[in-house]
Image: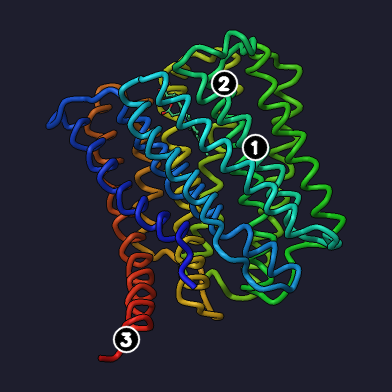
Amino acid sequence: MLNPFLLMAVFYLIVAIVAAVDAALTSFTLLPWFVGLPWLRVHFITLGIFTEAAFGVLPAFVAARRGTATPATRWDIWLTLNAGLVVLLAGIPSVNASLIITGGTLVFIAVTLLILQLRGLGAGHSEGNGSLKFYVAGLVYLLVGILVGTGLWVGWNEALRLGIPKEVHIHANSWGFASLVFAGLLVDLLPALTGAPLASRRTLTTIFWAMTLGALGLVLGPWLSGNLYVTVPGLVLHITATVWLLVMLVRALRRHGLFARAGAWHLVVSYTWILLPVLVAPLIILGVPGIPGADIEATAPQALIYGWMLQFLYAVVPYFTARWLLADGQARLGGNWLSLAAVNLGGVLIWASIFLIDARGPLHAAGYVLFGVSLAAAAWETGAIALTALRRAESDVAQPV
Ligand code: HEM
């Protein structure tokens, strides 16, 4: 069965190359800067690749955990999500309020329908040390992120009394949605890769609550105009749980010799790029001289999206496409040594561009060239799997004359 969400994820993986190349060309001042392009660059990855892939695999993982067959595609959800995405892709760069509200509402409806579908699939089944709670909580944070994101350029955030709206949006989506869904994916992936669960039920439940409540603090902090009494405990809880999860992940991957391939490295190293801003944040708050707070806030989100989210996806999206498009029971993590070196070196250059002001343009540009190279390497591998699956499906339906 062809999974249309995964096909869209592969499509946006390829589109994202164009956006990375554009960033390189504008930094070398070979192209003029277009309003809205940074938005497209980030959201081709967050909505185009990540959200599409999540919609494609979460129902399948929840059903597999229950021992039932992968459910049929929910075309109503596919249509609502993709219609919303297209409308946003037109509305946000042109700052058109009606299009932004329409697109945001459609994506919001799609996420709500997915939550209901997942709850239906998991109903009546003991969760065990399952991933469903991670997925549902992550998607609820996504709903908050969409609400605030849609309001960012249409001005309804005053009504919600949001102190620092853009930060609320980024935190709800990164620390809430992506962190929790990634954790759930690791819970589901590890038994498939190593034959053993990632951790005991009790440990996973503790990690789940620490991440979920931690994310709440991180969302409420900027909502209350940067209230440190909420943000700091949230950060500590969330990071402690993340590091705990990582330690277990590294042990499991090492025990099974999976570090011989680049995919395991992608999974683990990607977390450097979410931990780095956390280490720098106290220096910004304390106003340490030589730490350009405003520049970090302007640049770090993009480094986070490429270094963490996209790099994690390099490992899992090829796995998903092999498992659900090719029906390959032996699917392995994706990525290769080129994508590993390029995406991480790119992240180093983008961070260096924050501090080395004189060389900022070329460093920024070189960083995006490397992101583009890593994307091309990952898209090549994933595209080849998708193409094989499509060819196979085509030959299956071709009738002999
Ligand atoms: C319906 C869904 C969404 C809408 C309407 C939306 C809207 C927006 C808007 C208007 C901005 C501000 C751009 C600016 O001020 O420059 C933004 C920034 C951002 N969004 Fe979203 N967003 C959505 C989904 C997501 C998701 C799912 C993620 C992550 C998983 C995400 C991550 C980010 C990040 C990291 C930024 C900061 C980009 C930067 O500063 O370079 N967004 N979004």
> Marks 2 and 3, Cα distance to the nearest angstrom?
66 Å
Q: How is the image coloured?
A: rainbow
Residue 399's disc is 3
Kindly identify which residue carries mark 2. 283
Q: Nearer the viewer, mark 3 or mark 1?
A: 3
Residue at 55 percent of width and 39 percent of height? 274
Residue 134 at x, y = what percent?
Answer: 71, 49
Residue count near mark 3 (Cα–Cα under 10 Å), binned few <14, some 14–19, many ≥20: few
Helix, strand or loop under label 2: helix
Proximity of marks 2 and 3: CB atoms separated by less than 8 Å: no
Residue 331 higher or lower than 401, as above or below: above
Q: Three-letter amino acid code at disc 3?
A: Gln
Nearest the viewer among 227 and 180 is 180
Residue that extends furthest to the front in the rendered view of this protein: 401
Residue 393 higher or lower than 49, as above or below: below
Residue 245 at x, y = what percent?
Answer: 70, 52
The answer to whether the beta carbon of the residue marked 3 is less than 8 Å from any atom of ligand 1 is: no
Give the side of residue 267 with respect to residue 176, left or right: left
Residue at 78 percent of width and 62 percent of height? 199
Kindly identify which residue carries mark 1. 176
Q: Nearer the viewer, mark 1 or mark 2?
A: 1
Proximity of marks 1 and 2: CB atoms separated by less than 8 Å: no
Helix, strand or loop under label 3: loop
Q: Of the residues under marks 1 and 2, which one precedes in the sequence?
A: 1
Residue at 42 percent of width and 38 percent of height? 43
Proximity of marks 3 and 1: CB atoms separated by less than 8 Å: no
Q: Three-letter amino acid code at disc 1?
A: Gly
Residue count near mark 1 (Cα–Cα under 10 Å), binned few <14, some 14–19, many ≥20: many
> Marks 3 and 1, Cα distance to the nearest angstrom?
48 Å
Give the side of residue 23 with respect to residue 313, left or right: left
Q: Of the residues under marks 2 and 3, which one precedes in the sequence?
A: 2
